[in-house]
Amino acid sequence: MRPIACSAMHRRKGQATAWSVLLVIAFFARVARCGAEQQAGDAGEAKALGEQRRFSNPRPALVSTIAGTGSLGRLDGDGSSATFNFPADLALSKSETFLVVADSQNHQIRHIARTASGDWRQAGAKVTTLAGSGIKGSVDGVGAAARFWLPQGVAISPSEEWVAVADTVNNLIRRVDVKTGMCVRPFRETLHPKP
């Protein structure tokens, strides 16, 4: 009798497992159906409101290179010949006329100016070093006299006159003047000074 009872117990356990699997499948099918209904509803709502949503009719984006050859280096020049070494962050100026790049492994802050015609074509973009000697360190100064150590973040002030730099390994927030390349620490001014 024991083998029969044991067999019946295994059969019940097998049925319970099968039901568990079926419940899981049904649950995920319901989630998928609800998601599809929600998406369809959103698409209909978007059409009614005259909006375009990403999932309804995505358009391919044009991707182009602004600056860099793809090789490691720290050469300045036009966008097609300039080189970088693990650029970690960048910021676009409010006027959209220049970019500032935290070129982390070069320990430099780089500046990319838009082309004379006003676009961001690689051949016409001008890349210069705003601050940093290319040697890691923690030194204030103008241009190449300043030293950073793996800068990982940059932000351009609303006035476009200076850049805040996260000088990561040095645990400092530095300020770099956009026109002169003067780098100072610690960063004392606020982003939004009182009127």
Image (cartoon, rainbow, N blue to C red):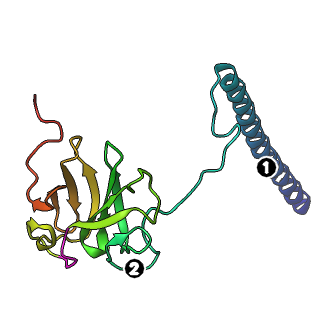
**Mark 2 secondary-structure assignment:** loop
Amino acid at pointer 2? Leu
Amino acid at pointer 1? Val
- Mark whose residue sits in front, 2 or 1: 2
Figure check: 34 above or below 109: above
Decide: few, some or many residues near mark 1? Use Cα within 10 Å; few <14, some 14-19, many ≥20: few
Quadrant of image for the C terminus: top left
Q: Which residue is mark 2?
A: 72
Q: Residue at x 44, y 55 (%)?
A: 120
Which stretch is magenta?
131-136
* Main secondary structure along the magenta-highlighted residues: loop
Q: Position of residue 184 (x, y in %)?
A: 8, 59
Quadrant of image for the N terminus: bottom right
| Mark seen at residue 21 | 1
Figure check: 93 above or below 69: above
Q: Position of residue 45 (x, y in %)?
A: 68, 22
In the shown orientation, is residue 174 left or right of residue 85?
A: left
Q: Nearer the viewer, residue 39 or 128?
A: 128
| Residue 133 on the magenta segment | yes
Q: Residue at x 49, y 63 (%)?
A: 65
| Mark seen at residue 182 | none
Q: Between disc 2 and disc 1, whose residue precedes?
A: 1
In the shown orientation, is residue 31 left or right of residue 114?
A: right
**Mark 1 secondary-structure assignment:** helix
Decide: few, some or many residues near mark 2? Use Cα within 10 Å; few <14, some 14-19, many ≥20: some
